[in-house]
Image (spheres, rainbow, N blue to C red):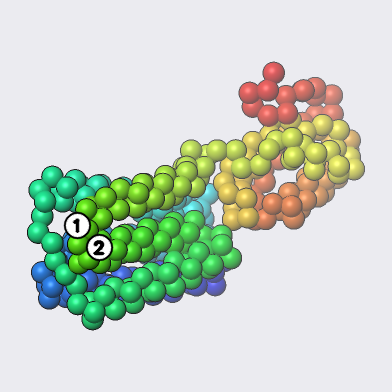
Amino acid sequence: MTISSRSRVQRVLMFTLVFNVLVAALKAAMGWWTGSLSLLAEALHSVTDVSSNLLALVTHQLAAPEPDRDHPYGHQKFEAVGTLGIAVFLGIACFEIFQGAVERITNHSQTVSIPLGVLGGMLLIVGGYTAVSLLERRVGERLKSPLLLADARHNLSDLWVTIVVIAGLIGVHLGYPWIDAWLAFPVGLLVFWSGWEVVESSLPWLVDQMAIAPEAIYALAMGVPGVLNCHEIASRGIVGRQVFVEMHLIVVPTDVPSAHEITEQVEALIEEQYGPARVIIHVEPPDYISEQISFGDS
């Protein structure tokens, strides 16, 4: 990710933080005004959103693209750790939803009505969540930022939670008190699914999962004139953002300058095909024989 792209992500995260602070304050004010426990609980839930945004800002700041002495492979994994942190917040929100629903069903808590002004405020919040989520997803997809995409899912889950609160309060007002509690369960499942997707998107970074199929790299390398064989191929990272590739090559020329020129052609092809890449190539002697394209191959 370039410096300008990182700056754009930073601005979007700051905007989202300010939005969530305003939403938390508005929900708390409406909850205090109406005496609605669900609105007060929603205000507390929004506080976790603010904490999530602060975590995202801190981890994004740490995830600088430039390597240094202590982090020679860069700092991108800090961003993956940040997305896992957001997944934890999603899990907490899911637990809160189920816990609140069970308490309402078992305790038959007192119902409340909602004035039109509060309903209008909640609808305004729904519109805000929708706009912020779409903004984060659009910028996240354009800049290939897993942190923004994870936070977009988080805001989308908040949208559904807010809709459930509105539907529940309206249902209670119309004489159907059971709607408020039972609608919370499918929304909780949606929040849980969003958290799982966040975890799934972050794991490849953290566990060094294969980024590019070794057969694809093998085909690219073998297409370069002068390459006799390519083996022991390994890759990690995320295609389009940053990948690390290692391989062994057997080339026709025996002099170092000519062999180096061939390796540079291979590196250029990989970067052209898969985006930013750091490629390490070990040149083997011409008489070296290996049929093992990648690790684990027999």
Residue 270: x and y, percent? Answer: 73, 49
Reading the image, the residue beneath label 2 is: 171
SS at mark 2 in the image:
helix
Question: Residue at the spot x=48%, y=38% of the render?
Answer: 207
- Residue 228 relative to residue 174: left or right: right
Q: Are marks 1 and 2 in contact (CB under 8 Å)?
A: yes
Question: Residue at the spot x=80%, y=29% of the render?
Answer: 285
Of residue 271 and residue 85, the one placed in the foreground of this image is 85
3D distance between C-alphas at marks 1 and 2: 6 Å
Question: Residue at the spot x=23%, y=81% of the render?
Answer: 117
Task: Say above or below: 161 vs 227.
Answer: below
Instruction: Give, as a three-letter code, the residue at label 2.
Output: Gly
Residue 170: x and y, percent? Answer: 25, 67
- Residue 118 relative to residue 193: left or right: left
Q: Quadrant of the C terminus?
A: top right
Residue 85: x and y, percent? Answer: 34, 51
Q: Quadrant of the N terminus?
A: bottom right
- Picture quadrant of residue 43: bottom left
Counting residues from the N terminus, which is met first, the one under dot 1 or under dot 2? 2
Instruction: Give, as a three-letter code, the residue at label 1.
Output: Pro
Q: In the orientation shown, which residue stands out farthest toward the bottom?
A: 117
Residue 137: x and y, percent? Answer: 50, 64
- Picture quadrant of residue 37: bottom left
* Label 1 Cα crowd, 10 Å radius (few <14 / some 14-19 / many 20+): many
Residue 114, visible in the rendered structure: yes
Reading the image, the residue beneath label 1 is: 177
